[in-house]
Image (cartoon, grey):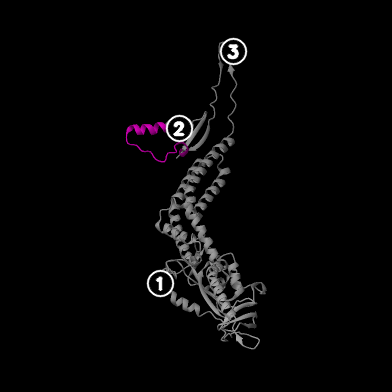
Amino acid sequence: MPKDGGIMAFVTSAGTLDKRDESTRQMLADKADFIGAIRLPGGKNGAFHDNAGTDVTTDIIFLKKHEGKSLAEMSDIPDWVHLGETADGLPINKYFEQHPDMVLGTVVEGNKLYGSGTMVVAEDGFDLKSALHEAVGKLSAEISHERGRDVYAKTADGVQVQIPSNLRNYSFFMSDDQVFFKKNNAACEFRFDKGTAQHKRFKAFIKAKESALLDFAEDYEPVKKFFNGDQKQIFDDVLRILGIYERSKTYIVDKEIEDTAAEIRKIINNPTPYNDIYKLPPLRDTFIAANVKLLSQMAEPVKAAIADARQRVFEELDGKLCHDKLCDKFVRLFQELKEKAESCNDVAALKAITSEADALKLRCLNEIIDTEARMTPPAPPQPPVTGGDGDTPPVVPPPAKPVKKRKSVSIKTINNATTWQIETEDDVKKYVSELEKRLIDTLEDNTVINIEF
């Protein structure tokens, strides 16, 4: 970590500056002044497509460390902590809204299922090296040339002793093979002459404690870094992604997704995964890209099923008395189902939408039948019996035909078999006989049943 006034730069995903949760940016603003940032393109012409195999949009962030100034004490919170938007209304960090020339490419709408929903793309032949050199030249910051001085404590007789950093007051330590006792940051006391038994025992004691503390530090520092930085958020992200995979893995036949999920699982199942967290962002990006590609392919037949169900419903609704009453409602229901399919990030949930489309179709068809029956005016009354005088028989009108009810059912509720295996005529007769029995069982008195395929 640099000293106060030191300059640092690091590469991170665009989510650090663009995510809605400002807590990470607030934490950075507490510790450093923002010099500027450069957004690098992602996609097939992205900055890390060739050397790291990831198409994620990334930022280079430049900061200057400061001490003694927290965000809560600032009169104005820096703009870069907040989000803004591009000229096209897409969400982006306020800094890039004010400095669009520091975005090396075109901001476009990306995958809304993950992150902010934007990405930066570059055209074929884009000279990233030159663009990056030009962008860096636009940054400016004052760099202090004053060298920090080391501060030494003094013993009672004026001997300067460098106290180990982060050592608590009233603690023992060793310097130049001598034992000292720290009173405060500027004073310490000499203890035990060299060669004495007390010196030897205390030296051995400190060495033993030092070894134990070093072992503890090796385990503690990664844990501290995990909870204080972005690692926990990264870990939570991949846990959510792995949950999506676990729910859908029965339907997924994709080696890239399966291998990536296995690598992610290997890291998160490790009792001490802290030193491997850096591997998760590229694995996460690889999984997301492959999953989006698979979802796009699998969504096509699902959207086709929704379109077929919608067409069947509106064919039935056309010309009916209830058309105006039900039309807008049905348009909304099918649009909601289509949007659900387009935004779904779970293969298992996407597969289930086909059944939802079939269920929605039956629901709408039966609602058409019921609403049409209520809106149809009743039949006129039967004319009275006439004649019957003398030898003329009375005229009796023919009985009115009963109005039959109508309902729609899915063939899947009648024939729930997924496959038929036929080899002989007897096999055909067996399946047809079973289907005939189920169709007969479906019949109801005074009811016309529409079988929907």
Q: Tell me the element at label 2.
A: helix
Q: Residue furthest front?
A: 197
Name the quadrant containing residue 155. bottom right
Q: Which residue is mark 3?
A: 389
Q: Tell me the element at label 3.
A: loop
On whether residue 259 falls in the magenta region, the answer is: no
162 vs 124: above or below: below
Q: Tell me the element at label 1.
A: loop
For label 2, count other residues whose C-alpha is less than 10 Å away and answer few (under 14), some (14-19) or many (20+).
Answer: some
Of mark 2 and mark 1, the one earlier in the sequence is 1
Q: 431 or 124: which is nearer to us? A: 431
Q: Are marks 2 and 1 in contact (CB under 8 Å)?
A: no
Q: Amino acid at mark 3?
A: Asp
Q: 241 or 182: which is nearer to us? A: 182
Residue 82 in the image, given as x and y percentages of width and height: 60, 69
Give the alpha-carbon distance from disc 3 to disc 1, as whole Å: 104 Å
Asked whether residue 3 appears in the rendered view, the answer is no
Please tell me whether mark 3 or mark 1 is closer to you in this view.
1
Give the alpha-carbon distance from disc 2 to disc 3, as whole Å: 55 Å
Of mark 2 and mark 3, the one earlier in the sequence is 3
Q: 407 or 195: which is nearer to us? A: 195
Q: Which residue is mark 2?
A: 438
Which label belongs to residue 125? 1
Residue 403 in the image, given as x and y percentages of width and height: 54, 29
Of mark 3 and mark 1, the one earlier in the sequence is 1
Name the quadrant containing residue 179. bottom right
Name the quadrant containing residue 158. bottom right
Residue 119 in the image, given as x and y percentages of width and height: 49, 66
Q: Residue furthest bottom?
A: 158
Q: Amino acid at mark 2?
A: Arg
Residue numbers of the magenta segment: 411-434
